[in-house]
Amino acid sequence: MKSDSMNQFVDQPLRALVVAGAVLMATSASVYAQSSSAPAAHQLTRAEVRHELEELEAAGYNPAQGDDVDYPADIQAAEAKVAAKHQAERSAVMGLGQTGQTKPTP
């Protein structure tokens, strides 16, 4: 009789562990399936990352400063300058295309 009651005490925690393990495995599988089915974003190449860093450095960002107290502000300012430069370039290209099309004929 003792062995039956002892088996019951061992079986209940073991069953709980098996159920918990199955739930965790099912949950992790669904999370993996969700992340892998999402459309793949464009992965930056090393050349693109280097080019971006060169643009930021040209705009005044210095990554060699390390733990600078102005860290977030200085890179954000450089990013804003680069974004403004890109916007100006796009505007110039769009302006050239539009002025070429709307040129009055003599």
Image: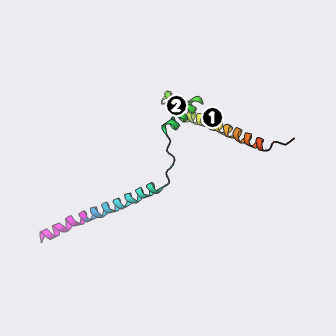
Front-most of residues 33 and 16: 33
Residue under the image location 66 percent in, 39 percent down: 87
Residue under the image location 24 percent in, 63 percent down: 14
From the image, tell me which residue sits under label 1.
Answer: 81
**Quarter of the image where one finds residue 77:** top right
x and y percent of residue 17 in the render?
Answer: 27, 61
Q: Amino acid at mark 2?
A: Val
Q: Secondary structure at mark 2?
A: loop
**Vertical side of 89 occupied by 23: above or below:** below
Residue under the image location 32 percent in, 62 percent down: 22
Residue 65, magenta (yes or no)? no
**Drawn side of residue 92 relative to residue 41, left or right:** right
**Quarter of the image where one finds residue 12:** bottom left
Q: Which residues are magenta?
A: 1-14
Residue 6, magenta (yes or no)? yes
The quarter of the image holding the C terminus is top right
Evaluate if marks 2 and 1 touch, with contact meaning CB atoms under 8 Å apart.
no
x and y percent of residue 35 in the render?
Answer: 44, 54
Mark closer to the chain start, 2 or 1: 2
Residue under the image location 54 percent in, 34 percent down: 51
**Drawn side of residue 98 relative to residue 77, left or right:** right
Circle 1 packing at 10 Å, graded few (<14), some (14-19), many (20+), is some
Number of marks drawn: 2
Residue situated furthest front in the rendering? 106
Q: Nearer the viewer, mark 2 or mark 1?
A: 1
Q: Amino acid at mark 1?
A: Lys
User: Can you tell which mark lies on residue 91?
Assistant: none
From the image, tell me which residue sits under label 2.
Answer: 69
The quarter of the image holding the N terminus is bottom left
**Drawn side of residue 17 relative to residue 55, left or right:** left
